[in-house]
Image: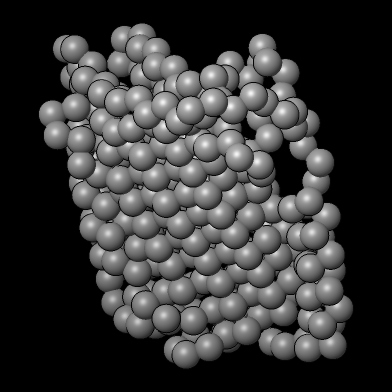
Amino acid sequence: MSRKPIFLAVTALVLASLACNLNVNLPLRQRETGPTVTEEINIPLPAGQTGAADLEIRFGGGELDLSPGAESALVTGTAAYNVEELKPEVSTKGGRVLISQGDFDNIGSLPNLRDNVENRWDLAIGNAPLNLTIAAGAYRGRMEFGGLSLNSLRITDGAAENVLSFSEPNQADMDTLTYETGASNVTLTGLANANFSRLAFRSGAGSYTLDFSGELQRDAAVEVTSGVSSVSIIVPEGTAARLSYEGALLNVDARDSWQASSGDYILSGEGPTITITVEMGAGNLELSNR
């Protein structure tokens, strides 16, 4: 289904909306910078933990790199910063661990990261069973979760440029993967390897790619809710999928093996099925196998 004249108008709306959102005046305040401090982070596994641990990462802004690799620990890595308020804080209570970036509630505003402020976390996560929550602001992120044991994953962020990947299968049955973002550029790859039962992706204006490559081990339900945006959904050849959508000003570009069927789009395949529902205000929805 193609509505090219409508889509041209919608594209202009997308660009205008992105410009408004990405240049919004956040409550930034100049902060005095100093020499860069690099702190080691080493969080052991919660003592006596029998079930999944709860790990929450709160990151205001800067660069955030997450990957597997913490041996015999929950989290290891470094945090480099040159503003005192960005000093990371770690708190542990029972099976819950919180890594947070300063006390922004008390300082009243985020430091201005557009100038000479440095803030970078490079963290490795262990493979113990885990419920992982990430809350971030305006940042650049790289998140690799392949081979971990995630029972659940929840990410919320603001104006982000983030690439999340599962290069290897998740070692646990994930109940729900939730990703909520604002005006962002986000790519999710290897999603079949996440081994989730349900994926809820919610976004504002922006550009988003959901790539379901990997090993699909069971039926999965996917809900995509987006504003004025461009969304690309990739399902590999041979994976069964069915997609339904809503959006009055939505252009759907179905490529490769996707076929229209009674108002939906289907992809023939064997084994488990991905059932996708998309609700977009306006924009472009692209379906492909690669």
Horizontal relation, residue 1 to residue 189: left or right: right
Horizontal relation, residue 275 to residue 104: left or right: left
Nearer-the-camera pick, 53 or 184:
184
Nearer-the-camera pick, 248 or 231:
231
Q: Residue 112: horizontal and vertical position, in percent?
A: 68, 35
Q: What is the number of callouts on the image?
A: 0
- Does residue 101 appear anywhere in the picture? no
> Quadrant of residue 1 in the image?
bottom right
> Which residue corresponds to the image point at 32% horizontal and 56% vertical from the top-left?
166
Nearer-the-camera pick, 114 or 71:
114
Residue 14 position (above or below residue 287): above
Q: Quadrant of the C terminus?
A: bottom left
Q: Residue 94: horizontal and vertical position, in percent?
A: 31, 10
> Which residue corresponds to the image point at 45% horizontal and 22% vertical from the top-left?
88
> Quadrant of residue 27 in the image?
top right
The outermost residue toward the front is 35
Residue 199 position (above or below residue 106): below
Q: Residue 206: horizontal and vertical position, in percent?
A: 68, 61
> Which residue corresponds to the image point at 35% horizontal and 69% vertical from the top-left?
213
Horizontal relation, residue 19 to residue 41: left or right: right
Residue 280 position (above or below residue 234): above
Q: Residue 29: horizontal and vertical position, in percent?
A: 74, 28
Color encoding of the figure: one colour
- Does residue 34 appear anywhere in the picture? yes
> Which residue corresponds to the image point at 45% horizontal and 30% vertical from the top-left?
36
The outermost residue toward the left is 72
